[in-house]
Amino acid sequence: MSRERIISAVALILFTGMAAYQLALPGLHYDEAFEAVPAMQLLLNQPVTSFRDNGIQLGGRLFPLMTQDYIGAINTYAAIPFFLLLGINPISLRIMAIIIGLLTLLLTLWLADLLYGPLVAALAVLLLAVNPTFVFWSRQGVFVTSVTAAIGLGVALMWLYWWRTGSRRYAIAGAFLIGLGLYAKFLFLWLIVALGLAVVLLNLHRWRRFSRRLLKAPLGWSLLALVLGCAPLLVYNLQTGGTLRSVGDNLTTSYYGTSNLAFFPNLLERLRQFAAVLSGGHFWYLGGTYANRLSLFIFLAALGVTLAVLVIGRSRDEARRALFPFLVVGGVIVASCATVSALWVTHFAILVPWPALAVAAAIGLLIHRREFRVTLSGANLVLILASIAVGASWLLDVAVDVRYHQALSISGGLGAHSDAVENLARWLVADERRGAPVVAMDWGITAPSAFLTLGEVTPVEAFGYDWETDADFAARLEQFIEDEPTGIYLWRAPDEIIFDRGADFRQLYEARGLEEDILEAFYERSGRPVLGATSLVPEGTAVNPPKPLGD
């Protein structure tokens, strides 16, 4: 076995070990559960709930097309075979996500081998395999839609094969994957733009030849393949208009208040987030914040080496190939300054393989280019120093992974990632509460409760998704307050509130001579409350009334 294969095998083993350890932690996040619930319902022959009631009726069952206006149902259907084999539980869902992570590593290896050779490919996979962001986002891949990273690498591979062989089947396959990526998550558009700009910029010096080659692409078949890849997205918009409405309504200012016109402030925030992605210093919810402070320096040094070869090197083709992943990274960062949601660091899940590819390509330049050969007794000092720096950064990544796992074993996850949600689910299915109506009074409760109870308890979301209480809030709750006195109301703890409906709810029940009684609270392992359950009782009879905020 060659050294490259040994390095690659070690990388895959390291990643699998790091990603699969204590896989039940952190707790099941709402976004993970939200995409998994329809798969559970299909397998258990339960009525299927879908976003905006979208979907296709087949055999009397509803099959959702999208899980959100801009997120497709790929994870929903990908989870089904894992649920069949391993049971309907969070572990099965996360094993699926880890396998997608392994696929991403293999595609990185494949693309790097084609572009830079087997040694650089092995180094790229070794760097990516222990990157804390890649490891911990792969564990919760549904949460960040990590499948987009794999699809993006597939697009680059197929179009590279087309460019080298001229076989139109690769161009068609690449176009299909572009459509599939858009369906998986609409922000895949950022990567399409970045890939396109990178290829154009790197071929400006031979534009005539490049443009003639592009004209030979099977445009008609490629367009058809692209449409086929994103067909569920198109059908969804014919049914609901949801994606188009979401983009239109958030064109200048998003639902979360992000101004898409504030380009430079957004760019600064995205650059800060990218540095955090490199270092792994953004997983506060695992129980601590740890970072590889050397990672950004390594990335910038690799960029400097690549640019230096491009400027002073005798043969610039190798440098242009090495610059390709840097341009992709830059293109995604710039494109991501406009969003229909918010400037969330999780958006960069689509980008995670590319920095490792870029650093490895720069190391390849140091190995092969004479411009950097400063020798002493036959040893290349520049390459030795670079290897020491990259090796130190790699070891720091491993150390960060270990520290996050240590913190996670103590915390069980924080906030919306706390494993307290599992205690809530067990409490909801206790015999004395079986059959009671359950109402979710804030975000992040319904989907995990439904999934963890296998659909036995699916709380009704009564809070509404407007930031301020909407006009129909009272109407949604009246049936529970008046007709269902045994109802259970689920809340986020005071310092976890997202949609604050407490005061408006209080006005409704106090007008009927009722008050709230706390039934149970659910805590992080540190003892901090994150979730709670209340009921309504006649005024003056509450055993444990909640304290007003501020007391």
Image: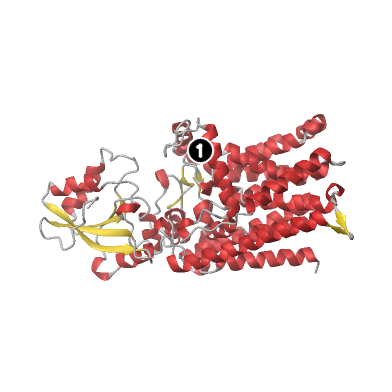
Q: Position of residue 353 (x, y in %)?
A: 65, 52
As drawn, the residue found furthest toward the right would be: 378
Q: Residues within 10 Å of mark 1 (few under 14, many from 20)?
A: many
Q: Position of residue 27 (x, y in %)?
A: 43, 62
- Element class at badge 1: loop
**Picture layout, residue 19 above or below residue 164:** below
Measuring 68% from the left and 64% from the top, which residue is drawn there?
Answer: 11
Type of amino acid at the residue the image marks with label 1: Thr
Report whether 337 appears left or right of 469. right
Q: Name the residue carrying label 1.
A: 339
The foreground one among 5 and 383 is 383
Chosen colour scheme? secondary structure
Residue 12 drawn at (x, y percent): 66, 64
Residue 313: which quarter of the image? Answer: top right
Q: Is residue 166 visible?
A: no
Q: Is residue 188 left or right of residue 461?
A: right
Position in image of residue 94 (x %, y %): 52, 62
Near-viewer residue (523 or 536): 523
In the picture as drawn, the residue positioned furthest to the front comes out as: 376
Residue 211 appearing in the image: yes
Closest to the observer: 188 or 382? 382
Residue 456's quadrant in the figure? bottom left
How many numbered marks have been drawn onto this rendered protein structure?
Answer: 1
Location of the N terminus by quadrant is bottom right
